[in-house]
Image: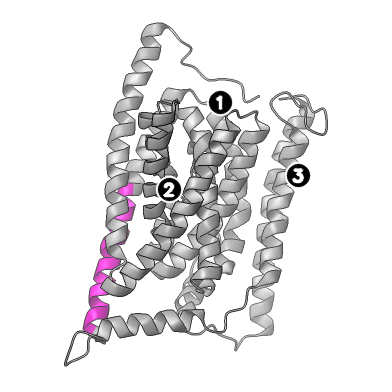
Amino acid sequence: MDMVTTILVCILSAMAASLSSAGGVGGGSLYLPILDLVGGLDLKTATALSAFMVAGGSLSNVLCNNLLLLNGSSIDYDIALLSQPCMLLGVGAGVVCNVVFPEWLVTALFALFLGLSTVKTFQAGFVCWNAESDGVVRVHAPAGGKGVEEALLMEEEEGGAGYETPWAKLAVLMLIWLCFFVLHVLNGDKDGKIITRVRPCGLKYWLITSSQVPIAIGFTAYILYRRRRNRHNKPDQQKVGKDTVVYNTIEALPVVVFPMAALLSGVLGGLFGIGGGLLINPVLLQIGVPPQVTAATTSFMVLFSSSMSMVQYLILGMKDIKQALVFSAVCFVASIVGLVAIQRAIVKSGRVSLIVFSVSAVMALSAVSITCFGAVDVWRKYIDGKNMGFKLPC
C-alpha cells in the first residue's frame, strides 16, 4: 500500500470510526470494504487489520464513556458478564474458520451477514425513531419547544450522578479474558513456537483448544448461579431509573438467550474481523434494552472480543503489525472525536435514530460493494487456476 492510498484509507477509516462509535458497534463492516476496495488488500489481510482497528475504536469508546462523558453507568455489566465467556469462545472458532475457509466462502458469508445486519439495523432505527416520536409527545412543553431538550439534558445528568465502577465484575471479566488468552498462548503460533512446543493440529493442540468449551460453560454457569443467589439473598432490592427496564428484561428472558447470541456474534467476529457488535446491538434493542445502554454495553463487549481476535491473529503469525497499529491509532482518535460530536448532536436534535439510519445506509453500500468485488476476485482466481478449496487450520 503506497503513501497516498494509506492516507486515503486513514481518512475513510476515521470517518467510519466516527460513525460507528455512536451506536457502539465496532465498525468492522465499514473498515473491511475500505481496506479491501480502497486499500487493495485481500479479504483475509483486511480482516486481520480490521481486528486491530475495531479494538482501537472500542477502547476509545469505552474510555470516553467512562472518563469524558461521565455516563459509564449506561454500561450494563450483568449483560456483559453473561455474554462474554461464550463470545470469546466464538471468537476462537471464528478465527479458525477464517484460516480454514476459502476466500470465496468468507466473502459470501460476509455479504450474507452484512445484508441481514443492515435489515436488523434499519428495523432498530425505525423502532428508535418511533420511541423518540412518542417521547416528544410526552415531554413537549405546552407553550414552547424546550420541553424535549430539557428532558434529555436532565436524563443525561441523572445517568452520570453517583456512579461507581463495579470493580468486582470488571475483575471477573478480566479473568475470563486472561483464561482464554493463556490457552491461545499455550497453543503457540502457526509453527508452535511461543512457550510450549505444541505441534499444530496434534493431540495436545486440540485438547487445549477444546478446553475453551468447558471454561466458557463453567464461567457462564457460575455467573448465573451468583445472580440467582444474590437475587435470593436480596429479594427486595430493585434497580431504579433506566436500569429497571434492563433488569426486568433480563429476568423475563430464557437464560440461554444472551450466551447463544454472544456465541454466534463471537464466531462471526472472529471470521470477519469485526467485534460482533452488529449482531449483539440489534438483539439488545429488540428485547427492549434502551438505546444508550445498548450502545455503551455493546461497545464494552466488543472491546473484549476484538482484542481477543487481535491477539489470535498475532499468534497465528500476522504480518504488517506496524500498519495495523497506525490504523488502530487513527480509529482510536476518530472514535473520540465522533462520539463527542454525536453526543452533542443528540442533545441538540433529540434523535439518536438519525445516526442509526446513516450507519445502516453505509452498511448497505458496503454489502453491495464487497459482494461485487468478491465475485470479481473469485472469478479471477478461478481463471488463474488457484486453489479454491479449504485449508488446514494450522
Q: Which residue is mark 2?
A: 27
Q: Quadrant of residue 222?
A: bottom right
Does residue 130 belong to the magenta stretch? yes
Q: Which mark is residue 182?
A: 3
**Residue at 57% across, 79% down:** 163
What amino acid type should be assigned to the residue bearing mark 3?
Val
User: Which numbered dot is residue 100?
Assistant: 1
Horizontal and vertical percent for residue 291? 39, 67
Q: Is residue 252 left or right of residue 315?
A: left
Mark 3–mark 1 Cα distance, whole angstroms, equals 23 Å
Q: Which residues are magenta?
A: 118-137
The residue most toward the front is 3
Task: Tell me where residue 198 sits by quadrant.
Answer: top right
The amino acid type of the residue labelled 2 equals Gly
Q: Is residue 110 visible?
A: no
Assign a secondary structure to mark 1: helix
